[in-house]
Amino acid sequence: MKTVSRKAVTVATASQYKLPTELKPIDTDLRHYTTLVYGHEKWGKTTFFSSYPETLFLMTEPGAQGLSIYEFNHEKGGVCDWDVLRAAVDLLEKSTQFQNVVIDTADRAYDMCLDWVCKNMNIPYPGQDDEGRQDHGRSWRMVKVEFLEQIHRLKRTGRGICFTSHCKAERHRTRNGDEYDRVYPSMSGQARGVIEALVDMFFFGEYFKDEHNKTVRCLITEGDDSVWAGHRPIAGLCKLPRLIPVVEGKGYSTLLGAFQGTVKGYDPMMLGKDRASAPATGDYLIKARQKERKEGAKGPAVRKVVRKP
């Protein structure tokens, strides 16, 4: 068999490309921004994503019985293991059906991926090889690689990719010894590190009381020491509204409006903490009001020129 030198392969590969001469355009298609929404059980995460157009749900745990959605393999329990999710990816690569894919929940999907890798490596848990010796992170890397590979396969189809997760509070300590809670997705630290690198927008779904003492739902898009949330620059907009209102059946249209710069968020001055909300949310609201006063405006500035995908 004829061998090819490393240098020859490198030169041949490089010859297929060229350096850019123009700035790439800003992407104004919401589907191309991967999204995670996490929050309390029964907050309405699955319902929120059910408002997305032509969406396929990869349900890894029960919770959509009351929703009329496209659920993969629902007759046999949905996505009950990683092989089922891989089969869904195989089918989606060969089809033009569906604009968006929701993995509900990311926690369970990552755990399924971990179990699948361990089974294939013949190990009980990442960290050791099949003879019980420390593998210096190789198995953990294999879990990450496998999970990312399937998500990247989905992204390459051009569909929007969305995740859900539950929430949990973690206790932290400052240098002064003071303790405080911060809300995170309920997934493991390893999963959170992988998902955070994947997503462009990660929002916390929360309850508040409005000025009429009515319970309202919203997405917290800008995090702080109390809440894990944030997003990369969105279609040329530096920041989305800090608190985006969520009305059942209008989740997608509202987020799209915020994405396009036409939807204004809740004024934190007009909101109060709801009894059902996480304890850390009270601290978040206080800080949001302080920011509002410093900014000297009703809310974060929105783009004046509306861009439509």
Image (spheres, helix red, strand yellow):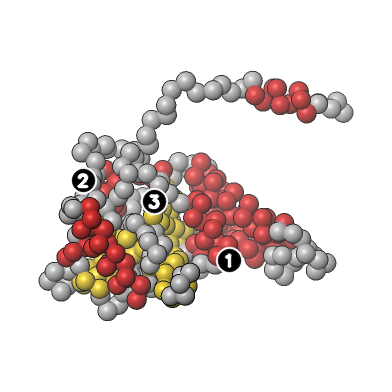
Q: Position of residue 161 (x, y in %)?
A: 44, 50
Q: At which x and y percent is residue 157?
A: 49, 41
Which badge, 3 or 1, is on the more N-terminal residue? 1
Q: Is residue 111 left or right of residue 8?
A: left
Q: CA distance from mark 2 to mark 1?
A: 38 Å
Query: In the rendered picture of this protein, how many numbered marks are placed on residues?
Result: 3
- Residue ranking furthest to the bottom: 275
Location of residue 25 by image quarter: top left
Q: Which residue is mark 1?
A: 111
Q: Position of residue 192 (x, y in %)?
A: 52, 61
Q: Which residue is mark 3?
A: 231
Q: Is residue 142 visible?
A: yes
Q: Quadrant of residue 216?
A: bottom left
In the figure, is residue 300 to the left or right of 188? Answer: left
Q: Amino acid at mark 2?
A: Thr
Q: Amino acid at mark 1?
A: Asp
The image position of residue 287, as x and y in percent, is: 29, 64
Q: Nearer the viewer, mark 2 or mark 1?
A: 2
Mark seen at residue 262: 2
Q: Element under label 1? A: helix
Crowding near the residue tagged with mark 3, few <14, some 14–19, many ≥20 C-alpha atoms within 10 Å: many
Residue at the image point whose x is 32% and y is 60% from the top: 220
